[in-house]
Image: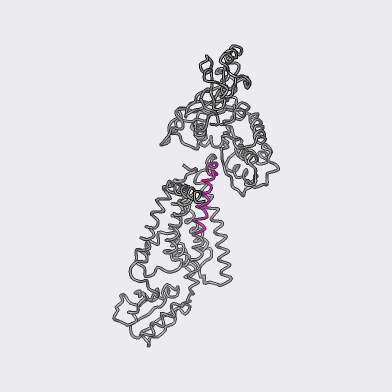
C-alpha cells in the first residue's frame, strides 16, 4: 500500500448531550475507495465532516498528505454531501462554472459535463432536475477541481435502483482514474461493489477495519443459514450454535453444515423456509454491532 | 378538525418556544419599541408647524404669535442659515419680531401658508420679505429620502434573507467545502447587491426626474459616490445580521429593529430640526442619516466633496467595519 493520503488520529467530537465520535483513528492510502459504514447515529457523517474540514473536532487531528487540513486540502478535495441545495435558477453548466471558478486548477466545465453524462441537461435549471440528475450534477461539482480525494456521503440514498446503478457506474469510472474515494453508505451492495477497504463504526467508535473479503473471512465461517425468526423456537436457542438474531430473521454461522442441520432437526426447527448463503457485509455488520444497518 | 388544528398549534408553539433567540427577541421588541417611541415622541403634544425666530433666545412676551399652540418656535441666530432651512422646508416660516416685524415664507410650502395666516392674525402689520435663492418644494427635499429609503430596504432585506436561505438550504455548507473564504463570499454578495441597487436607483432618479422634475444643484458623480458608499454601508449592515442566525423570524425582527428607527429618525420624511439634541446625535449613528445628509447637501445646496467628506468617511468606515464583523461572526452552516 502507498503512503496514507489522509490520517485520522484520536478524533473526538463532543456535543453537550452526546459524544458523536469517541476516539477514532485510521489512515486512508492514496488511490483506494474507502468505505465508512455504520447505522444512523454511529458517528460516520460527523467523522467524515471533520475529515472534510467543515466541522472542527473537539480533540484529535486529521492530516492530509502529512499536513493539517488547510488551503491545499480545500483545493484538492471534492465533496458530495448527503443533502445540498443549489441555486435554483442556475443551469447545470452555470452551477459547474460557479464552482470551477472557486478553484485555481481543475477540469474544463465541458469535460466534467461529459464525464458525468450531463450533456443533455447542461442548459437545464437545477431546480428542474430529477433526484438522480441532481445527484449527478452534485458529483460533477465535486469533480470540477479534479480532486485527489473525493468524499461521497451517502450518495445514492433516496435514488431509485436504476439511478443508483447509473451512479455506481460513474463512481467506478472515477475509481479507474485512480482517485481516492471516501464513501459512507447504508447500502452493503454499494460498499461491496465499490470499496477496497472499509471501516465499521458504532457508537462513535471503529469496530472493524479491513478489506471486505478479509473481514468476512475473519468473522465468518463458510456459510450462513437464514431462518425467519418465528421459525426458530425457544428450545433451539439452547443449541451450541453461533446465532445472530435480527428483527425479522435469525442467522446461524457454521463450518459444519451437515452437523448444524442435524441439530436443527433434532430441535424440531422447521426447515421449509431455510436459506443457505455465503456471508456478506450486512451479516458482518449485524454481528459486530448487533444492529441492522438501516436501523 | 379541532384535534388536527390543536396538534399543529401545539407543534408550532413548541417550535417557537424552543427557538430561544426568536423568543427573546419577540419579548424584547415590544418593550424596546415602547421605550424608543416614548423617548422620541413622548412629552407634550407634538407641534404641527415649525417657525424660526430670528433671535438668540425666544422671549414669549415679545408677541402674541409666540403663544400660538401647536407651533414650535426655534431660535435662529443667523439669518442666512435660517433662510436656507426655510428654503429646504426644514422651517415652515421664519420671522423677525423686532419692529418692524418681518417674515419669510416658502411659497411652495402648504404648511408655510397656514403658518403665515397665523402670524398675520397676531401681527397684521408684519411685512413679507423675499426669500433669497431658490425656494425648494417639499418634493425636492423629500426625493433623496425616498431614494434612501428604497435603498435601505433593498440593502438590508435583499441581502439578509438571501444569505439566510443559502444557509438553511445547505448551499453555504457546500461553498464552505471549497477554498472560498467568508470575506470573499460576503464581498461578492455586497457587490452583487450594490450593482443592482445602483441600477434601480439610477432608474428611479432619472424616471422621477423626467416625470416630476426635481432640484439637483450638485455634481452627479459626487451623488454616485454617495450612493455607492451608502449602499455599501447598509448592505454590510444587513450582512452582519444575517451572518450568524438561521431563524427567519429572528433575522426579520432584527432587520425591522434596524429599519424602523432609520425610517423615523434618519430624516426621510421630516427634518429633526428642533428635536432634542440627543435625538439628533443619536440619529447620526445610522448610515442612512449620513447618506441623506450628504445626498441633500449635494442635490439641494450643490455641496462639494469637502462639505460632505465627514459623511462619506463615516459611510466608508461603517461599511468596512460591518463587513469585517460579518466575516468574523459568519457561520457557514446551522449549528
Q: Quadrant of residue B263?
A: bottom left
Horizontal and vertical percent for residue B291? 46, 62
Residue B76 appears in view: no
Q: Identify the residue at the far front of this view.
A: A268
Q: Residue at x 49, y 43 (%)?
A: B332
Near-viewer residue (A49 or B58): A49
Q: Quadrant of residue A171?
A: top right
Horizontal and vertical percent for residue B151? 51, 60
Q: Residue at x 47, y 56 (%)?
A: B233
Near-viewer residue (A205 or A181): A205
Q: Identify the residue at the far bottom of this view.
A: B125
Horizontal and vertical percent for residue A38? 53, 29
Check if residue B169 falls in the magenta segment.
yes
Q: Most prominent secondary structure in the magenta stretch?
A: helix
Horizontal and vertical percent for residue B282? 37, 61
Above or below, comparing residue A149 to residue B239 in the picture: above
The magenta-colored residue range is B153-175
Check if residue B97 falls in the magenta segment.
no
Residue B303 appears in view: yes
Amino acid at each position: 500500500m502507498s503512503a496514507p493520503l489522509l490520517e485520522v488520529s484520536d478524533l473526538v467530537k463532543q456535543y453537550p448531550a452526546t459524544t458523536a465520535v469517541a476516539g477514532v483513528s485510521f489512515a486512508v492510502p492514496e488511490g483506494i475507495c474507502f468505505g465508512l459504514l455504520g447505522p444512523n447515529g454511529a458517528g460516520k457523517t460527523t467523522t467524515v465532516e471533520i475529515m472534510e474540514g467543515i466541522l472542527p473536532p473537539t480533540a484529535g487531528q486529521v492530516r492530509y498528505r502529512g499536513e493539517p487540513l488547510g488551503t491545499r486540502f480545500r483545493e484538492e478535495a471534492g465533496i458530495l454531501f448527503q443533502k445540498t441545495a443549489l441555486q435554483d435558477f442556475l443551469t447545470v453548466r452555470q452551477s459547474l462554472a460557479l464552482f470551477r471558478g472557486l478553484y485555481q486548477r481543475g477540469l474544463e466545465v465541458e469535460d466534467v459535463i461529459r464525464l458525468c453524462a450531463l450533456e443533455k441537461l447542461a442548459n437545464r435549471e437545477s431546480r428542474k432536475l430529477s433526484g438522480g440528475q441532481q445527484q449527478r450534477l452534485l458529483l460533477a461539482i465535486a469533480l470540477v477541481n479534479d480532486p485527489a480525494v473525493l468524499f461521497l456521503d451517502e450518495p445514492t440514498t433516496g435514488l431509485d435502483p436504476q439511478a443508483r446503478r447509473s451512479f455506481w457506474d460513474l463512481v467506478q469510472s472515477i475509481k479507474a482514474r485512480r482517485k481516492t474515494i471516501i464513501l459512507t453508505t447504508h447500502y452493503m451492495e454499494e460498499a461491496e461493489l465499490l470499496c477496497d477497504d472499509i471501516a465499521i463504526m458504532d457508537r462513535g467508535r471503529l469496530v472493524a477495519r479491513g478489506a471486505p473479503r478479509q473481514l468476512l473471512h475473519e468473522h465468518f465461517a463458510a456459510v450462513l443459514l437464514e431462518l425467519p425468526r418465528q421459525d426458530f423456537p425457544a428450545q433451539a436457542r439452547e443449541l451450541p450454535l453461533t446465532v445472530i438474531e435480527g428483527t425479522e430473521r435469525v442467522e446461524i454461522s457454521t463450518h459444519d453444515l451437515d452437523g448444524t442441520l442435524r441439530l436443527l432437526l433434532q430441535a424440531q426447527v422447521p426447515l421449509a423456509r431455510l436459506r443457505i448463503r455465503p456471508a456478506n457485509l450486512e451479516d458482518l455488520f449485524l454481528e459486530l454491532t448487533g444492529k441492522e444497518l438501516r436501523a | 378538525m379541532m384535534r388536527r388544528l390543536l396538534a399543529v398549534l401545539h407543534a408550532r408553539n413548541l417550535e417557537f418556544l424552543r427557538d430561544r433567540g426568536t423568543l427573546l427577541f419577540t419579548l424584547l421588541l415590544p418593550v424596546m419599541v415602547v421605550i424608543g417611541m416614548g423617548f422620541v415622541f413622548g412629552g407634550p403634544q407634538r407641534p404641527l408647524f415649525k417657525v424660526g425666530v430670528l433671535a438668540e433666545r425666544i422671549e414669549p412676551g415679545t408677541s402674541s404669535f409666540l403663544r400660538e399652540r401647536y407651533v414650535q418656535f426655534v431660535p435662529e441666530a443667523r439669518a442666512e442659515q435660517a433662510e436656507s432651512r426655510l428654503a429646504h422646508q426644514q422651517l415652515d416660516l421664519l420671522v423677525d419680531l423686532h419692529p418692524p416685524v418681518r417674515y419669510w415664507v416658502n411659497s411652495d410650502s402648504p404648511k408655510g401658508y397656514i403658518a403665515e395666516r397665523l402670524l398675520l392674525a397676531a401681527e397684521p402689520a408684519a411685512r413679507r420679505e423675499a426669500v433669497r435663492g431658490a425656494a425648494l418644494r417639499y418634493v425636492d427635499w423629500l426625493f433623496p429620502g425616498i431614494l434612501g429609503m428604497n435603498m435601505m430596504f433593498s440593502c438590508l432585506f435583499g441581502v439578509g434573507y438571501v444569505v439566510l436561505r443559502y444557509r438553511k438550504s445547505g448551499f453555504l455548507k457546500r461553498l464552505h467545502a471549497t477554498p472560498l473564504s467568508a470575506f470573499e463570499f460576503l464581498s461578492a454578495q455586497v457587490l452583487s447587491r450594490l450593482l443592482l441597487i445602483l441600477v434601480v436607483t439610477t432608474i428611479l432618479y432619472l424616471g422621477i426626474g423626467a416625470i416630476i422634475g426635481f432640484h439637483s444643484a450638485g455634481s452627479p458623480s459626487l451623488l454616485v459616490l454617495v450612493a455607492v458608499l451608502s449602499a455599501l454601508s447598509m448592505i454590510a449592515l444587513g450582512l452582519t445580521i444575517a451572518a450568524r442566525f438561521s431563524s427567519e423570524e429572528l433575522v426579520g425582527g432584527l432587520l425591522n429593529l434596524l429599519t424602523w428607527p432609520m425610517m423615523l429618525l434618519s430624516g426621510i420624511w421630516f427634518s429633526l430640526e428642533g428635536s432634542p439634541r440627543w435625538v439628533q446625535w443619536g440619529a447620526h449613528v445610522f448610515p442612512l442619516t449620513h447618506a441623506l445628509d450628504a445626498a441633500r447637501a449635494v442635490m439641494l445646496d450643490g455641496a462639494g466633496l469637502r462639505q460632505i467628506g465627514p459623511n462619506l468617511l463615516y459611510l466608508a468606515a461603517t461599511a468596512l467595519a460591518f463587513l469585517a464583523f460579518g466575516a468574523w461572526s459568519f457561520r457557514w452552516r446551522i449549528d
